[in-house]
RNA sequence: GGGCGCGUAGCUCAGCGGAAGAGCACUCGCCUUACAAGCGAGGGGUCGCUGGUUCGAACCCAGCCGUGCCCACCA
């Protein structure tokens, strides 16, 4: 017994389909990017649910260590206090309070979006269960030697006061100055970071560099300090850069650190964790950026600045959280040895167990996992999972697993640091299902079916889930498919940013246009892997589309359309009915295929045009004469709308639910409540309230359409296509002639198709609105033109000969060109020999069509040639 | 410095080897009893440039120009 439509039963026999939500940060609220991400996931889930899968869409949130801590710290600063005043415990409590209020509003936003998540299985990365998962895998990795502690140069944010992993550093091309400093008579070094010379412990040159070979092994006196430092030879130095001599500061530069290792150089730390100079002397207490010009000035005073300062563009790392320039810093941190994990993560994609959509993005993935550095996982923060390691009085190190008692006694203390927030995110696909316990959920839904996320967190999250998933789950991948989408941008393709003022709040759009319109706009722009431009105008268009569906359904209901009982067999149906059903089968097929390829833009496009053009603009108009009285057409219209609503339901759940219920007679007819469509909160925001008993009580669990080949009817499609051509031709004529609604037009059709069209004369009259003014209409087969229909037109009364002649001349010229092109092709022996048959046939058909068009224009021109009034033309009058 | 991608109608984008497409915007008609948030009819593109492969190229190849993104321990 399931609690509701969104809560799956892990014990059921249905095939599983599971998605875990990329957990949004508890910080702040959902932005338009989340709305895109959720729309895609919800659509996939809803379709599978309709297909009868046991679907799990698991919601949750991420504690987002550094980001959340920063938010709360800012709040405290506003209150004139700080986390240090509060102390660790009180501060963490504060963050939990913040999480409670912020997290609640995120859940509210998800409901507004219409997310069909399983609310009963909501998870948080700092939940007890997930914390246990973190501790478990830490211990396992530690025991396997894949987690280690080491003193390394890491990325350090002097503002956040914590270590960062490589990918938390954003590089930008910044303007710097390359300054050349004379270290001795023979050695000049170039640097952009003059202040770090205070920590120099060597000068390095390339071993093969003739200019310096004789100096290797000697010492120079480091200016401003008087320290003697050696000249060493190291292959890392590029002799062609600058002077070919480089200063070596092992404590403050990763390269220099390695040179220092190779040559046993000491590391002198000359800066504290805030980037303030600690070297005793005149610079002590200066910030690193103040120290730089101060050091340069001091050197200049001694005449040691050689060249003029040179502007220099180079790449500088910034903290991805706060933008502060990152400081490489030597410190003791915990690392994950990524070697074997990354190898497995790459192989799982290489051997096809995990597929990327679009596949091209796997290249970027490989480039990363194949060249991964070890992952620095310790953070000097208070908000997060505390590293489960204890240090003893005699230097013992004990990693404590879940359920184990930490060592007690004098002198034992736990590591102060917490884990990188992505460490727990990496466990998400299985920790949320109960791992390390062997739960029914884990057995049923792991591996999850598809991961939907933006390409921006491919490295942060996707790659790491792969590593930990494969490691923890005995080589089983965390998901089968990675469906990547892009970033939401504005209508000019510009990135959304607060400073630019083009940020869209999804809730604002939901208020104004409805959740469905917002979702449709996002889905319509979502081509796999590509960025998604959106605009208010487009959202208006989506709103209009939802409104169109509303009105069409209302009209259908007013005219007796319904979706109950079996569909009559094709042979009992009119050509028009057979035509729309045939078109429907193609649409069902196409949309289904597009779903398999995650082509949301195309899904939307296909359904938009079918619903609006085929169904509303043509089918509804064509059936108006009979819809009130013909039970077959009432049934067909009901069916077509039913199927369209089902196909659209994954994308726009609200309006489809309401209309579908009305169509099924399960609710009051939509006609009675013409409220704002798309903003109505239909039952699908919380289907747990609904109970499915006899037959689907909601479109949420209505069967997903499948194409029925018995209703595919090429002849009906061709016939209606001809009819459409005639109608369009007459309308164009009227428009070109500037005819008033009451003015008469005579039309004479010819060609084989005209034979069958004769039967549709009343329809054609209705569509061109000639039924009341007695216009003439004739269909003959007197000019049998293969494969086409020719239309000759004239007015009843004054005709603008110039306009009509110009139009016909233009059409004739186009047809002539077309015919010439086709004839040339068919006259080309090589083409006939080498081109595949369908192509040749296509060209032949094109030639025939061009000839028909020529016949039409010629006939019309002849008819036109005689008199301005064609009433007397016997041919036209039949 | 590497890698990836993109340049198609005014804007945003589909199309990726066989007649140049969509949405929005634009022009002209229409209050036609489902819908004016609508209906009907139009205008608008040497598919970045130059070569090459092919019977045939927006689509494949090469070079160039422009543009975006990712990675990177270039002092």
Image (cartoon, rainbow, N blue to C red):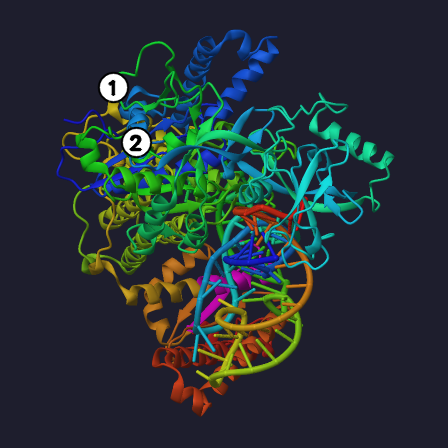
Instruction: Report if residue A625 is visible in the image.
Output: no
Q: Quadrant of residue A96?
A: top left
Residue A619, placed above or below residue A380: below
Residue drawn at x 54%, y 21% is A70
Residue A283 coordinates in the image, percent (x, y):
75, 25
Is A832 positioned to the left or the right of A7 in the image? Answer: right
Residue A755 coordinates in the image, percent (x, y):
33, 72
Q: Quadrant of residue A546?
A: top left
Tell me if residue A752 is in the magenta stretch. Answer: no
Disc 1 is placed on an element classified as loop
Protein chain holding label 1: A
Residue A579 coordinates in the image, percent (x, y):
30, 59
Residue drawn at x 81%, y 43% is A309
Judging by the rendered image, the residue that carries numbered circle 2 is A137
Residue drawn at x 83%, y 33% is A297
Instruction: Name the one closer to the observer, A233 or A862.
Output: A233
Residue numbers of the magenta segment: A726-749
Protein chain holding label 2: A
Instruction: Report if residue A556 is visible in the image.
Output: yes
**What is the quadrant of the N terminus of chain A in the image?**
top left
Residue drawn at x 48%, y 46% is A525
Disc 2 is placed on an element classified as helix
Judging by the rendered image, the residue that carries numbered circle 1 is A404
Tell me if residue A735 is in the magenta stretch. Answer: yes
């Amino acid at each position: 017994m399931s609690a509701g439509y969104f809560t799956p039963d892990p014990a059921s026999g249905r095939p599983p389909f599971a998605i875990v939500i990329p957990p949004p940060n508890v910080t702040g609220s959902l932005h338009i990017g989340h709305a895109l991400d959720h729309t895609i996931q919800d659509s996939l889930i809803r379709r599978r649910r309709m297909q009868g899968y046991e679907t799990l869409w698991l919601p949750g949130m991420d504690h987002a260590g550094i980001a959340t801590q920063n938010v709360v710290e800012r709040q405290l600063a506003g209150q004139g206090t700080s986390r240090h005043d509060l102390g660790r415990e009180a501060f963490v409590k504060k963050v939990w309070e913040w999480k409670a209020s912020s997290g609640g509003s995120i859940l509210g936003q998800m409901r507004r979006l219409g997310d069909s998540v399983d609310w009963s299985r909501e998870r948080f990365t700092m939940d007890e269960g997930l914390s246990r998962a973190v501790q478990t895998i830490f211990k396992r990795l530690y025991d396997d030697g894949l987690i280690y502690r080491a003193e390394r140069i890491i990325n350090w944010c002097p503002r956040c006061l914590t270590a960062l992993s490589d990918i938390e550093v954003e590089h930008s091309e910044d303007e710097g100055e390359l300054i050349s400093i004379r270290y001795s008579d023979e050695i000049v070094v170039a640097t952009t970071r003059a202040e770090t010379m205070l920590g120099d412990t060597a000068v390095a040159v390339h071993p093969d560099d003739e200019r310096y070979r004789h100096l290797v092994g000697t010492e120079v006196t480091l200016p401003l300090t008087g320290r003697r430092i050696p000249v060493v030879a190291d292959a890392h130095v590029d002799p062609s850069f600058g002077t070919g001599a480089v200063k070596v500061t092992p404590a403050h530069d990763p390269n220099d650190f390695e040179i220092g290792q190779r040559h046993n150089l000491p590391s002198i730390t000359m800066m504290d964790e805030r980037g303030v100079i600690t070297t005793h002397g005149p610079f002590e207490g200066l910030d690193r950026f103040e120290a730089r010009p101060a050091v340069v000035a001091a050197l200049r005073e001694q005449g040691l600045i050689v060249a003029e300062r040179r502007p220099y563009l180079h790449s500088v790392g910034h903290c991805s959280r706060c933008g502060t320039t990152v400081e490489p810093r030597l410190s003791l941190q915990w690392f994950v040895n990524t070697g074997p994990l990354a190898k497995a993560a790459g192989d799982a994609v290489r051997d096809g167990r995990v597929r990327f959509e679009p596949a091209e993005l796997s290249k970027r993935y490989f480039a990363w996992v194949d060249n991964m550095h070890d992952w620095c996982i310790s953070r000097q923060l208070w908000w997060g999972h505390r590293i489960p390691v204890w240090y003893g009085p005699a230097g013992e190190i004990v990693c404590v697993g879940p359920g184990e008692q930490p060592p007690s006694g004098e002198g034992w203390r736990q590591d102060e640091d917490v884990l990188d927030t992505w460490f727990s995110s990496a466990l998400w696909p299985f920790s949320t299902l109960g791992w390390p316990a062997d739960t029914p959920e884990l057995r049923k839904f792991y591996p999850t079916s598809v991961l939907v996320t933006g390409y921006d967190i491919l490295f942060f999250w996707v790659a790491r889930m792969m590593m930990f998933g494969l490691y923890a789950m005995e080589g089983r991948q965390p998901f089968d498919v990675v469906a990547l989408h892009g970033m939401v941008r504005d209508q000019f393709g510009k990135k959304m940013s607060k400073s630019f003022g083009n940020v869209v709040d999804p809730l604002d759009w939901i208020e104004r246009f409805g959740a469905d319109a917002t979702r449709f706009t996002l889905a319509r722009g979502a081509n796999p892997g590509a960025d998604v431009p959106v605009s208010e105008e487009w959202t208006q268009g989506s709103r209009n589309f939802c409104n169109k569906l509303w009105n069409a359904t209302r009209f259908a209901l007013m005219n007796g359309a319904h979706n109950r009982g079996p569909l009559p067999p094709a042979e009992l149906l009119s050509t028009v009915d057979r035509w729309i059903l045939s078109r429907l089968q193609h649409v069902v097929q196409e949309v289904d295929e597009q779903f398999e390829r995650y082509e949301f833009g195309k899904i939307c496009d296909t359904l938009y045009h079918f619903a609006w053009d085929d169904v509303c603009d043509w089918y509804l108009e064509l059936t108006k004469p009979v819809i009130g009285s013909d039970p077959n057409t009432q049934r067909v219209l009901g069916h077509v709308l039913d199927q369209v609503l089902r196909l659209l339901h994954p994308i726009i759940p609200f309006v489809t639910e309401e209309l579908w219920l009305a169509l099924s007679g399960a609710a009051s007819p939509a006609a009675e409540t013409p409220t704002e469509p798309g903003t109505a909160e239909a039952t699908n925001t919380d289907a747990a309230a609904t109970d499915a008993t006899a037959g689907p009580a909601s479109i949420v669990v209505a069967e997903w359409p499948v194409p029925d080949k018995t209703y595919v009817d090429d002849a009906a499609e061709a016939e209606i296509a001809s009819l459409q051509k005639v109608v369009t031709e007459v309308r164009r004529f009227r428009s070109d002639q500037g005819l008033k609604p009451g003015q008469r037009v005579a039309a004479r059709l010819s060609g084989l198709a005209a034979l069958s069209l004769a039967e549709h004369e009343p329809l054609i009259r209705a569509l061109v609105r000639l039924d009341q003014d007695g216009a003439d209409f004739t269909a003959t087969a007197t000019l049998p033109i293969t494969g086409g229909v020719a239309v000759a037109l004239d007015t009843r009364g004054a005709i603008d000969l110039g306009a009509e002649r110009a139009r016909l001349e233009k059409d004739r010229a186009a047809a002539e060109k077309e015919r010439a092109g086709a004839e040339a092709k068919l006259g080309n022996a090589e083409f006939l020999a080498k081109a595949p048959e369908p192509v040749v046939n296509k060209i032949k058909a094109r030639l025939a069509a061009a000839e028909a068009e020529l016949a039409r224009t010629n006939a019309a021109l002849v008819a036109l040639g005689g008199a301005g009034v064609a009433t007397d033309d016997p041919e036209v009058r039949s």
